[in-house]
Image (cartoon, rainbow, N blue to C red):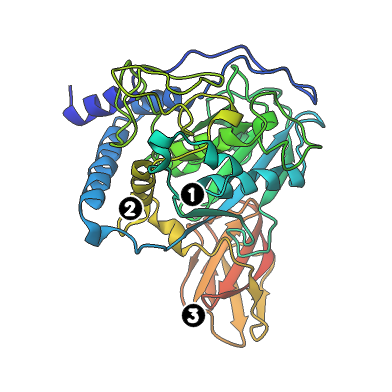
Amino acid sequence: MNKTYALALALSAGTAPFAAQAQEGRAALPTPRRACGTMEVFEAQLAADPSLAQRVAAIEAYTKQVQSQPALQRGMGATVIIPVVVHVLYNTAAQNISDAQVQSQLAVLNEDYRKLNADANQTPAAFAGLAADANIQFVLAKRSPTGAATTGIIHKSTRTTSWTTSDAVKSSKRGGDDAWDATKYLNLWACNLGQGLLGYAQFPGGAASTDGVVILYSAFGSRAKYAAGTYTASYDLGRTATHEVGHWLNLRHIWGDASCGNDLVSDTPTQQTSNYGCPAYPHVTCANQGDMSMNYMDYTDDRCMYMLSTGQSSRMNALFATGGARVGLLTSLGGTVPRLMASTTANFYPNPATEVLNIALTTSATAVRVFDLSGHEMPQARYNGHGQVQVSALPKGLYYLTLTNGTEVTHQRFEKE
């Protein structure tokens, strides 16, 4: 067997069994035990794409290199700002969670990843010195991939009553909603996730079209911050997203998905398996001094997980070093409000167009790009740098053409016939 593939399979072993499916609606039944589908998804992706194992191994090797060489690490105190787009897919009114509930989730992520959560003071003395501020901040997108202003929240009705880990929720053609550019945004999907799952994520290295995190709508957000929302008991403080975003940032389950397994972090105690509910500390396994069951990457209830370790912070931040797997997020303009190019006007003709779209500019633009109405760039539409865009390869339909000078943008809709 290929050694790299074998390594990836070893890392993926030990997916936890699923619990009973949570009931739809405002009074959703409690999920008996936390269940995360990330490792199941990872195993399926490895089987479908053997090249993924090589990409994962390369990311792991670079992570170790960054951690061992301070010169490669980002400057101390430099906060990573991650633009977020939330796709709310709903089949019932209860599933269409409000913007306020979505915003409560962003607030939880920012507290948890900056060690600003009020329950951080519950960390046992044995781990208090390891509890880390990961210096990662999340902001709802203010600029769409086309350069248009956005709230960063998409509400979309669907005929699908329940979603699985097949990633259909991430595809408009399959009734879901397509991901925004994964190199510039963190995509979160809130939906009626079945199979008893609270959520699942994609590790770095996977396909851009499916990159992001899926969360059960009633485990999305915090009852403590927005009481009027729709929540599932025990998982109503926003920690499911904290856990799943941890996977998206390359963290493994703390027990290593094996009996006394390896989570690839040096300062988290080896523990026998996942913890559920709210175990009292110390719960000793694998000859440790007590499981770090309050870590976000365990399976405890929301109210009983409240820390990341220094090693986990280091592992996540390696993704943002020069050459890191998610370094593109550092230069994303997704979190900034677009400014219209007041001095730039453009006439497009003919509109509709069949072969060529001509642009008459009064001032110059540094980039001309074409997007479909979902915000996906159409690379087959090519600008020649002299006022003409070749559109003959585009399917018939409506599109946006954007012009930018690097910081300001204007966009206009045209039709290809």
Eyeballing the image, is 205 above or below 28? below
* Front disc: 1 or 2: 2
The amino acid beneath tag 3 is His
Residue in front for this viewpoint, 33 or 192 = 33
Q: Is residue 184 left or right of residue 401?
A: left
- The image's mark for residue 242 is none
Give coordinates of residue 107: x percent, y percent. 64, 48
Mark 3 closeness class: few <14, some 14–19, many ≥20 residues within 10 Å: few
The residue at which mark 3 appears reads as: 386
Which residue shows up at 23% across the image and 28% down it? 7
Which residue shows up at 30% across the image and 37% down it? 56
* Front disc: 2 or 3: 2
C-alpha distance separating marks 3 and 1: 30 Å
Badge 3 element: loop
Instruction: Quarter of the image for the C terminus: give it.
Output: bottom right
Which residue shows up at 46% across the image and 60% down it? 79
Q: Is residue 145 left or right of residue 253?
A: right
